[in-house]
């Protein structure tokens, strides 16, 4: 079953790259618990419960507040009922034209083929700086 879970996550990343957000939402359990990283710009809804909350609280904001926001996974790892993806986010914040490029790690927990929990880790300081109008310098 875990190889199927890896394929689901790989498919979600591919769907995001094409703007096919309904594919991502369809992979979520009806009671999914979605956690954005602590201190991330979208952690105000933590935990987002259910696909509709994730769609409105995360994906709609990414789609309207960022230009060219991309999720580029470097690797997707099988950890049984959990799948781990890591790579880079990139995009331009619409309100000020500042760019972000930040590492991420995603933990997807599965039950019966659906994602029941998601946990994001990323460079929250960089996103806060970019949103504040500062160009991030590593």
Image: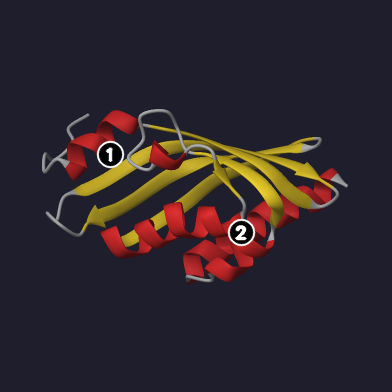
Picture layout, residue 108 above or below residue 67: above
From the viewer's side, name the closer residue of 15 and 49: 49
Choose top left, top right, bottom left or bottom right for residue 68.
bottom left
Nearest the viewer among 99 and 115 is 115
Relative to 40, residue 14 above or below: below
The residue nearer to you, when weighing 32 against 75, is 32
**Residue at horizontal 47%, vertical 51%?**
72
Q: Which mark is residue 50?
A: none
The image position of residue 23, as x and y in percent, is: 62, 67
Q: Pinpoint residue 47: horizontal percent, then vertical percent.
A: 53, 38
Q: Confirm whether residue 53 shows in the render.
A: yes
Q: Are marks 2 and 1 in contact (CB under 8 Å)?
A: no
Determine if residue 66 is in view. no
Q: Earlier in the sequence, mark 2 or mark 1?
A: 2
The colour scheme of the drawn protein is secondary structure
Q: Secondary structure at mark 2?
A: helix
| Image position, residue 10 (x, y; %) | 65, 55
Query: Crowding near pointer 1: few (<14 within 10 Å), some, many (20+)?
Result: many
Q: Residues within 10 Å of mark 2 (few under 14, many from 20)?
A: many
Q: Is residue 99 left or right of residue 11?
A: left
Total number of numbered discs in the rendering:
2
Quarter occupied by the C terminus = top left
Distance (Cα) linking label 2 and label 1:
23 Å
Q: Name which quarter of the figure residue 124 lies in.
A: top left
Does residue 14 appear left or right of residue 11 in this picture? Answer: left
Residue, disc 2: 12
Relative to 17, 92 lies left or right: left
Label 1 sits on residue? 127
At 61% across and 59% down in the image, what residue appears? 12
Q: Residue at x 48, y 64 (%)?
A: 17
For the residue pair 98 and 87, the one nearer the viewer reads as 98
- Considering the numbered disc 1 on the image, is that residue within a helix, a strand or a loop? helix
């Amino acid at each position: 079953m875990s190889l199927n879970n890896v394929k689901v996550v790989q498919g979600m990343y591919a769907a995001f790259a094409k703007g096919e957000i309904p594919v991502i939402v369809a992979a979520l359990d009806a009671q999914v618990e979605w956690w954005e990283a602590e201190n991330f710009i979208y952690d105000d809804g933590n935990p987002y419960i259910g696909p509709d909350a994730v769609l409105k609280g995360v994906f709609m904001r990414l789609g309207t507040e960022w230009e060219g926001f991309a999720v580029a996974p470097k690797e997707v790892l099988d950890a049984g009922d959990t799948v781990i993806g890591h790579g880079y986010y990139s995009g331009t914040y619409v309100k000020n034209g500042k760019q972000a490029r930040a590492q991420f790690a995603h933990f997807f927990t599965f039950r019966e083929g659906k994602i029941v929990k998601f946990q994001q880790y990323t460079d929250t300081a960089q996103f806060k700086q970019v949103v504040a109008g500062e160009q991030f310098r590593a």
